[in-house]
Image: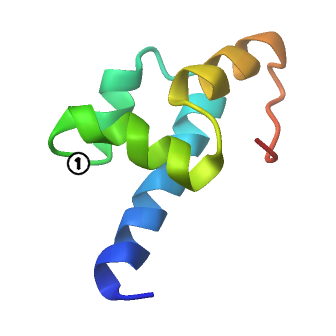
């Protein structure tokens, strides 16, 4: 894994944690993770975690304690 992929994975893991912790919007999470353009965030997220950011956020709403497994 090269440096670009490493830092992208770190940012995606941070986004995952933010979504599980009740982030208000997916755009807010993408901006906080410095994903530009925003349109690529969901695709990269789904490739990395196997689910969309919306699915993670919705799961967190129904399971307030969160879950580390997508």
- The C terminus is located in which quarter? top right
Look at the image and tell me whether residue 21 can be seen: no
Q: Nearer the viewer, residue 19 or 38?
A: 38
Q: Quadrant of residue 13?
A: bottom right
Q: Is residue 29 above or below residue 9?
A: above
Q: Which residue reaches farthest bottom?
A: 2
Q: Is residue 49 above or below residue 32?
A: below
**10 left or right of 57 in image:** left
Mark 1 burial class by Cα count in 10 Å: few <14, some 14-19, many 20+: few
How far across and down, in percent of the image, does residue 2 sit?
36, 88
Q: How is the image coloured?
A: rainbow
How far across and down, in percent of the image, does residue 32 sit?
29, 40
Look at the image and tell me whether residue 37 can be seen: yes
User: Tag count in the figure?
Assistant: 1
SS label for mark 1: loop
Write the residue at 81% across / 11% down: 62
Write the residue at 47% across / 65% down: 9
Please give the residue where the numbered disc 1 appears in the rendered image.
34
- The N terminus is located in which quarter? bottom left
Write the residue at 48% across / 44% down: 45
Q: Nearer the viewer, residue 21 or 59?
A: 59
Write the residue at 53% across / 29% down: 53
How far across and down, in percent of the image, does residue 21 sit?
63, 30
């Amino acid at each position: 894994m090269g440096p670009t992929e490493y830092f992208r994975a770190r940012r995606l893991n941070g986004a995952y944690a933010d979504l599980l912790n009740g982030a208000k919007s997916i755009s807010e999470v993408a901006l906080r993770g410095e994903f530009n353009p925003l349109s690529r965030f969901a695709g990269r997220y789904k490739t990395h975690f196997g689910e969309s950011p919306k699915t993670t956020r919705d799961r967190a709403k129904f399971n307030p304690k969160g879950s580390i497994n997508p």
